[in-house]
Amino acid sequence: MEEKIKFDDLGLSEATLSGIRKKGFEEPSPIQAKTIPYLLQGEKNIIGQAQTGTGKTAAFGLPLIDKLEPDTGHVQALILAPTRELAVQVCEEINSLKGSKRLQIAPIYGGQSYGEQFRRLKRGVDIIVGTPGRIQDHIDKGSLNLSKLSWLILDEADEMLNMGFVEDIEKILESVNEDKRMVLFSATMPKAILNIAGRYMGDYEVLAVKKQQLTTNLTEQIYYELSERDKFEALCRIIDIEDDFYGIVFCRTKVRSDEVAERLINRGYSSAALHGDISQNMRERILSQFKEKKTNILVATDVAARGIDVTNMTHVINYSLPQDPESYVHRIGRTGRAGQEGTAITFVTHSEYRMLVRIQRMSNTDIKKKTLPGVKDVIHIKRERIITELSETIQGNLEKVNESYDSMAKTLLEQGNPEQVVASLLKYSFKQDLDESQYKEIKNIKMNRDGSRTRLFVAKGRKDNMSARDVVSLIKEKTGIPDSRIDDVQVFEMFSFITVSFDDAEHIIDVFRKAGRGHRPMVEKAKPSDNNRRRGPSDGRPRGAGNRQGGHFYHSERKRGNNKRSR
Ligand code: AMP
């Protein structure tokens, strides 16, 4: 088994380690292993290159928890994040890791009432996680004093720049105290990021995690979109429709794997949890039972599953997504080996969607979206299976003498006609198994794909007699992408902007690159600097399609119908 860095090796205090244990993390993710020791000991500012889903929040959150003391009477750390969702997520993550430390952490974002935020700030906060526009507003109003910061963290800095926050960020950076430590996390390193670093971060170090070349095997890969609380129900349905489910259910934490295994056992399945807290003896016992198929569902963390040499599994289930594409490939490599058919199933919630897109892109695999089987489908499949199995049993027994059973059968057949008798025997044996009410409803979710939306620059504007409608028609005509997937169109004198999903953006860019034949393509990813160019009057209003995301931060804070950001 390859040697991995442990949380104990990073220099964190016992109190923080106990918070991590409570949360159930087993080992640091690569970006955590790299940045935590650095932030605990060094003095330098850092830039961390990491994407969402890699554990970057804990990478900066744990050192904050470790180093900050409560009750100082001033804000000690400011974390800037591009969207309301991310701000809330970061707050929740840090809160869930802080253990018994009494640090006050608050999200401050656009769209929420000022009154509530004034009150929260007055009560005293140690760590603020905020969106740049709203933080700048509080500074202007005098309701937020950031003159005694120990830490300033820019999370998803490239996203913030893409969203046009560069001026707000610069203003904030200029108005806070100089003697703080800065951390900047960004998935990509465009020049604009390095400019900010050059101007405001002085002496800094770049920490990145090496990427590996990834290949996947021929396993069938499927994903289901669902909410976190429906995952267990979905798991049961998947197991139930299989004739002989034999596989590993991967969870990210020990706590979760214990919980899932226990719930499976309570529901009558043969399951066991495998994670880092399980003793070596116990581990061996669990593994040998799994190999002998006495237990057919192993619920494991990545750490614990390392070194398991079972290869004939029918399924690998990603109950939660792993922290990087490498682990995904590693996980699913356990099924479908040696010519055997295998299926890899991934559960994807709103917050995991971006990681899924990354995994698809980096591992260059096609993970197909499917719909979960409905309760009626599951029951139907179970019925068919019972009929098949019983038919085989009946066939196998016809020629044999079954004396003791024959006399029982005679007695029973005297109770009614054969159909009634067999029906009541079936009911007696399978009532529970075929009862629809054992399955709970699974809610259909509308996936929030905004996290992976991309702003595109189109080199056509009013000078070319283009209206917003013309821009959409042009894109549709050249790429086949329907109007409904093109949002937030803005037309300026020389150029325009549109917003589309990450996947559509890739396709559009590709089509126009090919059409451009070596010349500058007509459509490109909007650059942060484009945000500054577009400050002129706009005749393009965000189109109705934008309303479909009503209430989403991107529109509430950034809607530019009047070319002014509402905060
Ligand atoms: P982030 O990249 O910070 O958005 O984290 C993505 C998810 O990974 C969150 O649900 C975290 O709770 C989880 N996570 C972060 N670090 C670890 C770790 N070391 N082990 C297991 N899960 C983790």
Image (spheres, rainbow, N blue to C red):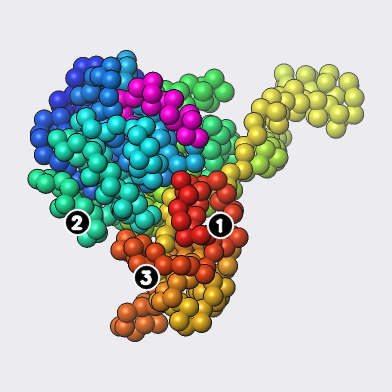
Q: Secondary structure at mark 1?
A: helix
Q: Nearer the viewer, mark 2 or mark 3?
A: 2
Q: Amino acid at mark 1?
A: Gly
Residue drawn at the location 35% of the way across and 52% of the way down: 165
Relative to 161, 536 lies left or right:
right
Separation of disc 2 and disc 3 at Cα? 21 Å
- Closer to the camera, 72 or 447? 72
Q: Nearer the viewer, mark 1 or mark 3?
A: 1
Residue lying furthest front in this view? 141
Q: Secondary structure at mark 2?
A: helix
Q: Earlier in the sequence, mark 2 or mark 3?
A: 2
For label 1, the residue is 546
Circle 3 crowding by C-alpha within 10 Å: few under 14, some 14–19, many from 20: many
Q: Does residue 243 lie above or below 561 as drawn?
A: above
For label 3, the residue is 524
Q: Does residue 69 lie above or below 57 as drawn?
A: above
The disc at residue 195 is 2
- Closer to the camera, 269 or 136? 136
Give the position of the N terminus as an image quadrant: top left
Relative to 494, 169 lies left or right:
left
> Residue 251: where, in percent of width, then height?
40, 33
Residue drawn at the location 35% of the way across and 67% of the way down: 533
Relative to 478, 198 lies left or right:
left
Residue 45 appears in the rendering? yes
Separation of disc 1 and disc 3 at Cα? 21 Å
Residue segment shown in magenta: 113-131
Instruction: Confirm whether the magenta stretch covers residue 107.
Output: no
C-beta proximity under 8 Å, tags 1 and 3: no
Q: Earlier in the sequence, mark 1 or mark 3?
A: 3
